[in-house]
Image: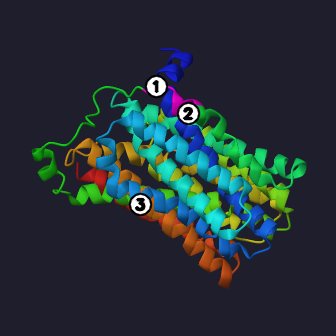
Amino acid sequence: MTMLQRIARDRHALAIQAAIGWCIGGLGPVLVLGARDLDVPRYQLAWLGSAFGFGLLGAGFLGRRILSHGAEPVTRVGAVVVTAGVLLLGFGSTVPLLVAGGLLQGIGCAAFLIATPALIGVEHRAGRLAMAVGVSSIAGLAAPAVIALSDRRFTTGRVGLIVPAFWLVIVAVRRVRASEGLGIDRPSANEAVKAERMTANTWRRWSVIVLAVSAEFCFWTWGAARLVDSGVEVDAASGLAASFAIGMAVGRLIGPRSLGRLDPVALGALVCGAAALVVIPDLPAQLLVVAMTLAGLGIAVLYPVSLARLLDDPALPEPRLIALAAFASGVAITVTPTLLGVLDRVIEIRYAFALVPIFLAGAVALDRQSTDST
């Protein structure tokens, strides 16, 4: 199958993942630009990342029920909600409006996250998920650059966040077709009983996602702020923050070719953890950019691999696993930005990046236990 055929097959999954990537990639720049535009301390906008996570938590609680309606309405509703969220973030003039935009963006992206496995199906899942989140990373790479350019041409660069609205309108009005074989119909009584039998191994796989996403969001949310603290101008920092996304995009595009030959979790954690330690010292901005690029390269496949492993868990029905995966991301995205925002009030934000290798060490340990027990 050619690359164009693969893109055509998974076009809806790729479109919504691109929107997710754009929204996540824009979080850091919007945080520093919003603080500047509204003349408020950065920690007041730390809720932007957490508001995004609240939407995922809701999807975790309701994901199975939501999926019972099918992937098509979930995707369409998500497109409308994300569009509303990015418009508020792009044009909002108060802190509550920005937080509301972050919440709507999170709810819509949560719908996209739980719809993506349904759109992809079970055939060649790990590789196709890696490709989908690779597109997400490319969008996450483009977002900071577009926001930085917009900041030079418009009143605020936050308007660059609204770009996904242009293709989400198409997603909202066109028919979406999910892959066969996922099993997202209403759960049977037997499945309902089965869903209560969550094994220790399931929780290990779930926890790996939490830790991997937590480490990832340290860079997504506060990468631009770290560059600002190193002396880089706000608009330039918004663009240079794309270095993390560059690493992730490269890693996720080449990752599927090596999934069968290497241990992606251990290797990726080693590279990303080491790069995070380089971000902590008071180094020139050029070295920080290199370190962020390497961090993105290292952590690139941790999420798609850990997600695929959770979805392959035999203890639970597929819709329940999808909801758990969304809940895992929600926990990470809710807690981590808030935690870093609190730390930003009491210490320099660079020291908070020491959390990254701690998160990743936990992810490797749990992943090893999960693999050894199967």
Return the mark for residue 57.
3
Q: Is residue 210 visible?
A: no
Q: Check disc 1 and report the residue beneath it.
A: 175
Dividing the picture into quarters, in which one does residue 164 lie? Answer: top right
Q: Earlier in the sequence, mark 3 or mark 2?
A: 2
In magenta, the rendered stretch is: 170-176
* Spatial CA span between label 1 and label 2: 13 Å
Residue at left offset 46%, top offset 25%: 175
Q: Is residue 350 above or below residue 227?
A: below
Alpha-carbon span between mark 3 and mark 1: 27 Å
Relative side of 174 to 289, left or right: left
Q: Residues within 10 Å of mark 3 (few under 14, many from 20)?
A: many
- Looking at the rendered image, the disc whose residue lies closer to the viewer, 1 or 2, is 1
Q: Amino acid at mark 1?
A: Arg
222 shown above or below 181: below
Badge 1 crowding class, 10 Å Cα cut-off, few under 14, some 14 to 19, many 20 or more, is few
Amino acid of disc 3: Leu
Residue 26 position, x and y percent, is: 68, 52
Tally of marks: 3
Is 338 magenta? The answer is no
Identify residue type, mark 2.
Ala
Label 1 vs 2, first from the N-terminus: 2
